[in-house]
Image: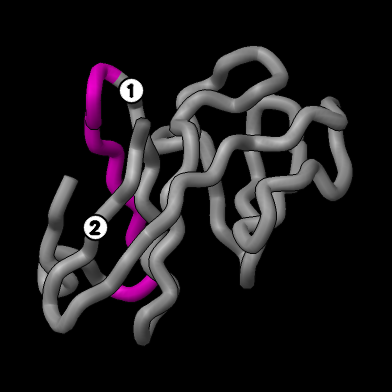
């Protein structure tokens, strides 16, 4: 899936569907884009609706689990299960999300 950097504002998160999977894209400025499963691994809450980004953590407000945007690990909260991250490549103005 290819997107444009100009489609995002700093701090914005967007849900997209790639190959039938709900993917959440988070933009933290510069070339800092993160792509991850949109469903919390704890109880499947929709992170595009209940997820809050603070620095480099995504917090699911269903049960306040904190996930690292760097490696997907659960830092603290209701689950120890990590969230799946997807590789993001940036070439000029284009963002490519690799979902297999």
Image position, residue 85 (x, y; %): 54, 45
- Residue 81 lies in what quarter of the image? top right
Check disc 1: other Cα within 10 Å, few if <14, some if 14-19, many if 20+. Answer: few
Q: Residue at x 51, y 35 (%)?
A: 50
Q: Residue at x 40, y 37 (%)?
A: 48
Task: Tell me the element at label 2.
Answer: strand
Image position, residue 76 (x, y; %): 88, 44
- Residue 17 lies in what quarter of the image? top left
* Label 2 close to label 1 by CB (< 8 Å): no
Q: Which residue is mark 2?
A: 96
Q: Which residue is mark 1?
A: 21
2 or 1: tag closer to the N-terminus: 1
Chain part drawn in magenta: 10-20
| Residue 80 higher or lower than 97, as above or below | above
| Residue 65 higher or lower than 20, as above or below | below
Q: Residue at x 61, y 58 (%)?
A: 69
Dot in front, 2 or 1: 2
| Residue 88 higher or lower than 82, as above or below | below
Image position, residue 43 (x, y; %): 66, 13
Task: Tell me the element at label 1.
Answer: strand
Verify whether residue 83 appears in magenta.
no
């Amino acid at each position: 899936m290819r997107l444009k950097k100009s489609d995002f504002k700093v701090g914005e998160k967007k849900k997209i569907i790639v190959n039938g999977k709900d993917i959440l894209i988070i933009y933290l400025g510069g070339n800092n884009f993160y792509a991850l499963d949109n469903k919390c691994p704890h109880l499947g809450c929709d992170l595009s609706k209940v997820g809050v980004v603070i620095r480099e953590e995504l917090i699911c407000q269903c049960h306040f689990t904190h996930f690292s945007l760097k490696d997907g690990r659960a830092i603290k909260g209701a689950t120890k299960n990590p969230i799946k991250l997807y590789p993001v490549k940036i070439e000029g103005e284009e963002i490519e999300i690799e979902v297999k």
